[in-house]
Amino acid sequence: MYSVEVQHISKSYTVKKATTPALKDISFAVKKGELFGIIGPDGAGKTSLFRILTTLLLADEGTATVEGLDVVKAYKAIREQVGYMPGRFSLYQDLTVKENLDFFATIFNTSVEENYDLIKDIYVQIEPFRDRKAGKLSGGMKQKLALSCALIHRPKVLFLDEPTTGVDAVSRKEFWEMLKRLKEQGITILVSTPYMDEAEMCDRVALMQNGSILSIDTPQQIVASFAQTMLAVRSASMLQLLNKVRASSFVENAYPSGIYHHVILKQQATADQLQQELSAAAFADLEIKKGQPTIEDCFMQLMRI
Amino acid sequence: MKPQQHNQSKTGAARRQFFSFVKKELLHIWRDKRTLFILLGMPVVQIIIFGFALTNEVKNSKIAVLDQSKDAATSSLIAELNASRYFDVEENLTSYKEIEAAFKKGKIKLAVVLPSQFSEDLKHTNKASVQLIADASDPNVANTLTNYATAVVMDYQDRVTNKQRLPYSIQVETRMLYNPQLKGAYNFVPGVMAMVLLLVCTMMTAITIVREKEMGTMEIMLVSPMRPQMVVIAKAVPYFLLSSINIASILLLSVFALEVPINGSLVLLIAESLLFTLVSLSLGLLISSAAGSQQVAMFISLVALFLPTVMLSGFMFPIENMPFPLRMVSNIVPAKWFYIIVRSVMIKGVGLAAVWKETLILTGMLLFLLTVAIKRFKIRLQ
């Protein structure tokens, strides 16, 4: 049984007679209780997709259901069952933490006490600031408050649109821990993010680019399906090394990644062949090793196809 | 039985949602002290400015007198001019040449010339003339002053001729009904009311709804069980309350500070004001559905509403004198009808029977605007 089903959804925006497609024939399904990630850079169509699923936008083509309810016909019923956290933390800046939470609880026909167990883990962290105005909270705190507000009515499906954008690394990690605990409560969670490293925290991910889904699978499976040889190289002069590697006839693609350059070899080429070529060029402190592909490498590779 | 119970809990929930939203909205207003101060202070300031500074009444204007006969008749006429609250005799001139010089000095607004043998002429030929020379660089003031002066001279003449009745004479008797002192306050209190209510209700309601769109909170409100129509209505309620306070402060100030009486029924006046408040609120809702940003909302409110209200409601410029197309346009300006109603009820003291037509027009506008506003309110983004 699927919690969210998307079939052949297309959506384009027309601004001054120029039509830009935002989503091109998207189809996927999310199982009940799954933590599903939609990973893609800015402009991939993540927000449009979320808005269609939360009944805020109408798709041009295709159908979608949330908890078995059609997003167009049964939009009222869906609005009572889902939690939604838009890209910007949409809280009332001039209301305190507690006022925000109480307000959203009432709007969603519930009370903070009724579902306190669900938000307890998150709320205890912001409780010391309960009388502080939301506008005066740090990014991480705002994010926790926004999540508490989106959860207050115990939604069946939770839509989080780029919840970790603009939040520090520690808060991001904490946030994913919280999502894992929520998943244990049986809540289906759809989360979008531009950060590839967050893909590993999801049960399954959809890699999105320019309105299309490049691949849908578990993070492990996506990495495992990386077919080519990837090397990590570095030396004292990184820029020259990158130029040299890119010019090599054995190399299909090369790009900087952390302190290494990741090098994808062509099908027939071997690591030894590149090693010989680079050694001949006499780079200082040259280091070549086998690279462990990450989701980001898979994404870069999928984008080329 | 069961579905009814469900219904009841549903309306209960809707009521809780509604009041929670109104409470939230009141908190927004209360926490934004500067805006609150402006909203509540604006009517007070406007009434005071219009009442005491921007008055088109002419009081204690300085005049010069050239009395060439210097007899009993002229001195009593001059004394009468000086005694009236409109004029202060600043200078007594001795020759025609001095008149020009006195005007040039800029002190006097009017010169009264009494020719020699004024009293003889009056007695023997029954015909004496008085020349009034006014500084018409401000035509309105010049006009008013000559009217006042003429009135004083006529008064004087009446008293003189009472003793010796003229065989033939037509007496023009003017009575200024409802506003015998021609007080400006009678005119602008209804105008200020229309302006303030429009600003508070229309502009603020439009801005506050558009702000939620801008902040992204409207997005969450839409993805909630609360009905979108309830959201906009709940947003309008606090501004309705604010407007009621403003109506009260304007009425209190006009009665106690400006001494403008409420001649008609206070209940009717308040009821009509609340009706106009509702019209303004629905206009605000309509603007909010069309505007994408707070600036646009403000711009539409000011250009499309505030200017027509000032120009075409009859408050500043009489509608009767406008060309036909503008007179037509003035009919769709709600403030025009409200202005007529307030003037009639407050100053003339008439009842509902006299203003039922205007009331009906405002009610029609309210229904139309509200229907369109709610119909236009989007249940989705875009």
Image: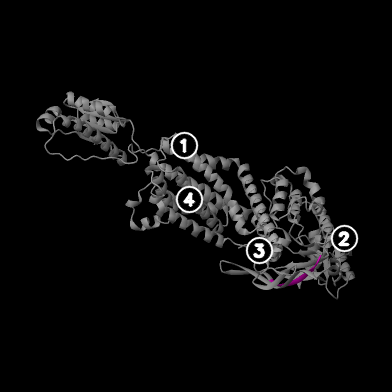
Examine the structure image and report whether residue A1 is included in the region drawn in magenta: no
Residue B327 seen from this side: yes
Q: Residue under label 4, please give it.
A: B276
Q: In the visual, does A270 lie left or right of A110?
A: right
Binning the other alpha carbons within 10 Å of mark 1 as few (below 14), some (14 to 19) or many (20 upward) gives some
Disc 1 element: helix
Looking at the image, which is closer to me, A129 or B244?
Answer: B244
- The answer to whether marks 3 and 4 mark residues whose Cβ atoms lie closer than 8 Å is no
Disc 2 element: loop
Where is residue B17 shown, x and y percent of the image?
A: 66, 53
Q: Does residue B32 lie above or below A151 as drawn?
A: above
Q: How many marks?
A: 4
Disc sitting over residue A56 in the figure: 3
The amino acid marked with disc number 2 is Leu
The amino acid marked with disc number 1 is Leu
Check the residue under mark 4 and report the chain it is in. Answer: B
Where is residue B111 shown, x and y percent of the image?
A: 24, 32
Check the residue under mark 3 and report the chain it is in. Answer: A
Q: Residue under label 1, please give it.
A: B253
